[in-house]
Image: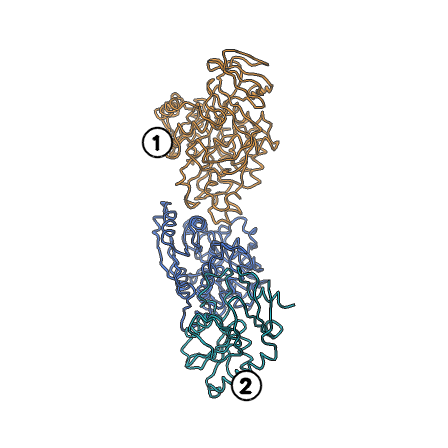
Chain colours: A orange, B blue, C cyan
């Protein structure tokens, strides 16, 4: 089975190559690139005027299965990923039961194979049940296929436990993904602590709730030598801490979500619960710092923190609504509209943060268009404009604050192992 | 003539001329309360539902009387606080209210934004009787009415609000209301109970309570709750009383004809010394009377007319 | 838009009518004992004050004058496009046992007087309530009549009567006119703006 992608601009951040070439896929692998390729036995996909990139990777999603299938399933999440141009996603372990042992990692991978459409890399829990008391069986989970460890959503509050987790993960040569939040500072907060929380009368989450733990985990990473990835950086202070640490040579990486580089806490006006997210939407100063961090390379990854919830769960008082925003199907549009069209990132830099950079952090052989690589490919139409309509999402979650927004940049086709799984929005 | 919106959710977005309209209409309403026959037929055939997710006999009684003086029918729903945590409760309540055909719903709820959520869901007029730490617009309006009645103006007055601003919906509504009507709003209280960015709302924060009180025309004292001590927000009621309690000595810093106000119920000897609470400057009980008049005016303006909300000429 | 207008009473006419009514009130009530006047907002108020002044001129004794706002008693609130502002009722004397003369500028359907009667009765139990109006234009919808009338003016329902008084309108005059458009009944103040040059 052959597929020939013709007329597009190949963009390979792994090598830095950007050129107008065709690309031939045979048997699930990239076999040839070059000008004016032809192969009579191949299906031809016209990519004229479009970007041909490695399949996009979202290293931070919540697929909710097992346990919360009303919010999302592995299948619906996989479809949402394909729709959004993603060929690989790493799913967080805060399911029920928590993915804290090899058996659950295996279960998720089995479900993922059944679903097809997307490669799924489960992230294992750092502590048993993500309770922050005892280390989870990291070695067992690594054998079962876990791609990293995180207690996302339930931050490890004990510095001592986190230090030992890093020592242990480093022994396994694995990455710790840290959700940085000091619960005693965050309190029962519902949004960023500042003028807007004062006006709205909602309990606030100060920037320090995140920054204290970013600083702690950087120090622990420096001490233990473990690779640490800071999830969903949202404050100017966090960006500065990561920048300084990287300059010192600490093995720390960081990601930012589209909502944190697109929206401020002003969006909470009117108590739209689809703006309730953890970490919360911050101020314009923080958004500018996150954008600067993306531009200067401090933040090397864009991840969505796709967190679907049911309409019933979100259609309540702001303080009672669960945290989370769905992101898989709006990511490309937001990256292009907010970062590329504005000149903050070049198209190649943006693609690197969605492909090769997360691939290297997760240690997976993805994120390149080199000959012989897996034929996971995303074709992006950078000029297409479209309107976000949550009703059209493949995800079960409709909880986006971007409903009605007009965006530029749309995934045109998603190709997984040489097979077209999405084309012009249609899932195949 | 009338209010621009269907609901009264807060003072943040209420124009000065709308505030003035409510205060003007409350004057004749107060006249009705002082009559022998405290009843006018204006809202005959209209129904008001009070939905309280927090206990508040005073506010509820005030709304009830206001509606009854205007001949509206009233019914109260007390939602168990336990049902709030289930989250479904407000949405279901909204459906019930819509089905019952109430003309006006008065909502008291522990979560900020609850009134706005309800207002979006039901066709009836929603009056916010306090939502979390967000707003308590009818309290602020009765405060404005009381000050205007006593001082003949609001513009140019120095209004010092003292205490737990962070958790106070009354403080927020009063900051919006007094600053919009031209008063100079000053705030003082423990730093841990001062919300960030509050100066952007149009008030000035004073580190020393003495500076806030200096020459004040109105001293507005907020209730301090013991549970804030348990949350580690201040060391204790004894120290609070020493640092921020309003006693006769502190009150002397204010203007000689200062008005002492409090949203009630008061903690004697904690945020307010007994001699201050019982002084001639204290207008705390008049605030209660005026509350009924102001709520009558609000009810009249929201549901007393016809379809004025649909007609736009 | 006003099609046509004609003056029914001028300043002198109004003065003569009020003088006659003042005499009738005194005569009917056998003096001023226990008498009180209550003007209905808005234009009943200056009329009541003028009548009180006339009565004082004639009898040498003051009669108390009160002001009644009937907004809260109107039966047409739900049909009005513009919600009226509630104003104060200012009656500083007890109405119980008094001989009350209600004063208004025009009696038409009788509904304003009905509201005024309810409003007064909520204040107490007068011995008697009488009604004085400057103009009676007919078309009653309720069994109500005036005891003292300045001038009877047969009108059609299409026509409107406008009473202008010095205290409010800077001139004394009573006009009859026919609004051109039937659809929206303009407010009194809007018409005034067109009539007073």
Say above or below: B35 vs A16.
Answer: below
Q: Is residue A340 left or right of residue A64?
A: right
Q: CA distance from mark 1 to mark 2?
A: 94 Å
Q: Quadrant of residue A153?
A: top left
Q: Position of residue A242 (x, y in %)?
A: 54, 32
In the rendered image, residues at marks 1 and 2 fall on the same chain: no
Q: Is residue A254 visible?
A: no
Say above or below: C123 vs A5.
Answer: below
Q: Residue furthest right?
A: C197
Q: Quadrant of residue C172?
A: bottom right
Total labels: the figure holds 2
Residue displayed at 42% across by 55% down: B225
Question: In the drawing, what numbered circle is on residue C56?
Answer: 2
Question: Helix, strand or loop at disc 2?
Answer: helix
Question: In the drawing, what numbered circle is on residue C14?
Answer: none
Q: Position of residue B40 (x, y in %)?
A: 42, 68
Viewer-closest of A179 and B9: B9
Say above or below: B198 vs C4.
Answer: above
- Chain letter for the residue marked with disc 1 in the picture: A
Q: Position of residue B14 (x, y in %)?
A: 53, 55
Residue matched to label 1? A97
Q: Check the picture and name the quadrant holding the C terminus of chain B.
A: bottom right
Question: Helix, strand or loop at disc 1?
Answer: loop
- Chain letter for the residue marked with disc 2 in the picture: C
């Amino acid at each position: 089975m052959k597929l020939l992608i013709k007329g597009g601009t190949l963009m390979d951040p792994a090598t830095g190559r950007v050129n107008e070439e065709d690309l031939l896929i045979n048997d699930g692998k990239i076999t040839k690139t070059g000008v004016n390729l032809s192969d009579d036995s191949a299906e031809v996909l016209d990519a004229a005027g479009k970007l041909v990139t490695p399949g996009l990777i979202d290293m931070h999603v919540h697929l909710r299965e097992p346990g919360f299938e009303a919010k999302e399933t592995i299948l619906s999440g996989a479809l949402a990923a394909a729709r959004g141009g993603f060929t690989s996603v790493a799913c967080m372990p805060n399911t029920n039961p928590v993915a804290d042992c090899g058996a659950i990692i295996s279960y998720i991978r089995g479900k993922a194979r059944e679903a097809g459409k997307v490669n799924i890399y489960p992230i294992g829990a750092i502590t048993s049940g993500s309770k922050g008391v005892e280390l989870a069986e990291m070695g067992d989970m690594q054998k079962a296929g876990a791609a990293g460890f995180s207690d996302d959503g339930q931050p490890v509050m004990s510095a001592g436990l986190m230090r030992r987790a890093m020592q242990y993960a480093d022994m396994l040569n694995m990455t710790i993904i840290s959700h940085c939040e000091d619960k005693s500072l965050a309190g029962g907060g519902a949004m960023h602590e500042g003028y807007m929380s004062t006006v709205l009368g909602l309990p606030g989450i100060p920037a320090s709730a995140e920054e204290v733990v970013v600083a702690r985990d950087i120090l622990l990473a420096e001490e233990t030598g473990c690779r640490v990835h800071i999830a969903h950086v949202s404050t100017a202070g966090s960006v500065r801490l990561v920048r300084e640490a990287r300059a010192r040579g600490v093995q720390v990486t960081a990601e930012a979500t589209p909502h944190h580089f697109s929206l401020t806490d002003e969006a909470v006006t009117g108590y739209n619960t689809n703006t309730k997210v953890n970490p919360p939407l911050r101020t314009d100063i923080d958004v500018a710092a996150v954008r600067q961090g993306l531009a200067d390379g401090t933040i090397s990854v864009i991840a969505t923190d796709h967190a679907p919830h049911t309409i019933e769960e979100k259609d309540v008082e702001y303080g009672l609504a669960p945290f989370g925003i769905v992101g898989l199907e709006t990511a490309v549009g937001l990256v292009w509209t907010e970062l590329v069209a504005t000149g903050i990132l070049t198209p190649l830099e943006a693609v690197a943060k969605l492909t090769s950079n997360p691939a290297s952090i997760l240690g997976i052989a993805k994120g390149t268009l080199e000959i012989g690589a897996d034929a996971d490919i995303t074709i992006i139409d950078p000029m297409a404009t479209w309107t976000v309509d949550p009703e059209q999402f493949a995800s079960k979650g409709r909880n986006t604050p971007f409903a009605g927004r007009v965006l530029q940049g749309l995934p045109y086709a998603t190709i997984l192992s040489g097979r077209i799984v999405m084309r012009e929005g249609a899932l195949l | 003539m009338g209010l621009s919106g269907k609901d009264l959710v807060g003072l943040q977005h209420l124009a000065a001329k709308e505030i003035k309209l409510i205060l003007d209409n409350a004057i004749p309403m107060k006249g009705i309360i002082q009559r022998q026959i405290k009843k006018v037929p204006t809202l005959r055939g209209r129904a008001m539902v009070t939905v309280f997710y927090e206990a508040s006999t005073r506010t509820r009684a005030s709304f009830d009387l206001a509606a009854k003086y205007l001949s509206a029918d009233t019914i109260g729903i007390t939602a168990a606080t336990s049902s709030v945590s289930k989250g479904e409760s407000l949405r279901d309540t909204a459906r019930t209210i819509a089905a019952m055909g109430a003309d006006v719903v008065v909502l008291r709820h522990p979560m900020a934004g609850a009134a706005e959520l309800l207002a979006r869901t039901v066709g009836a007029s929603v009056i916010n009787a306090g939502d979390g730490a967000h707003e308590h617009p009818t309290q602020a309006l009765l405060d404005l009415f009381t000050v205007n009645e006593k001082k003949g103006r609001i513009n140019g007055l120095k209004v010092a609000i003292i205490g737990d601003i962070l958790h106070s919906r009354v403080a927020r509504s009063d900051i919006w209301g007094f600053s919009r009507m031209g008063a100079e709003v000053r705030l003082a209280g423990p730093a841990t109970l001062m919300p960030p960015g509050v100066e952007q709302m149009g008030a000035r924060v004073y580190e020393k309570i003495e500076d806030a009180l200096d020459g004040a025309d109105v001293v507005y004292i907020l209730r301090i709750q013991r549970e804030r001590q348990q949350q580690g927000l201040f060391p204790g009621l004894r120290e609070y009383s020493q640092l921020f309690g309003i006693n006769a000595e502190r009150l002397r810093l204010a203007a000689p004809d200062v008005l002492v106000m409090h949203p009630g119920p008061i903690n004697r000897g904690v945020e307010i010394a007994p001699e201050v609470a019982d002084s001639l400057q204290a207008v705390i009980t008049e605030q209660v009377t005026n509350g009924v008049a102001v709520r009558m005016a609000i009810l009249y303006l929201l549901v007393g007319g016809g379809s004025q909300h649909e007609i736009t000429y | 838009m006003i099609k046509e207008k004609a003056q029914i009473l001028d300043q002198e006419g109004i003065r003569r009518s009020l003088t006659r009514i003042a005499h009738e009130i005194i005569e009917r009530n056998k003096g001023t004992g226990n008498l009180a006047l209550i003007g209905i907002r808005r234009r009943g108020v200056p009329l009541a004050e003028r009548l009180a002044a006339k009565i004082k001129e004639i009898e040498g004794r003051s009669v108390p004058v009160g002001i009644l706002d009937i907004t809260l008693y109107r039966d047409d609130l739900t049909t009005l496009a513009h919600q009226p502002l509630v104003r104060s009722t200012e009656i500083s004397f007890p109405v119980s046992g008094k001989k009350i003369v209600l004063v208004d500028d025009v009696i038409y359907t009788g509904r304003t007087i009905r509201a005024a009667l309810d409003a007064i009765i909520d204040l107490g139990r007068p011995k008697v309530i009488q009604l004085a109006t400057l103009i009676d234009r007919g078309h009653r919808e309720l069994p109500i009549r005036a005891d003292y009338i300045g001038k009877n003016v047969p009108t059609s329902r299409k026509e409107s009567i406008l009473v202008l008084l010095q205290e409010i309108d800077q001139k004394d005059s009573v006009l009859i006119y026919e609004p051109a458009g039937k659809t929206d009944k303009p407010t009194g103040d809007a018409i005034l703006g067109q009539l007073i040059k």
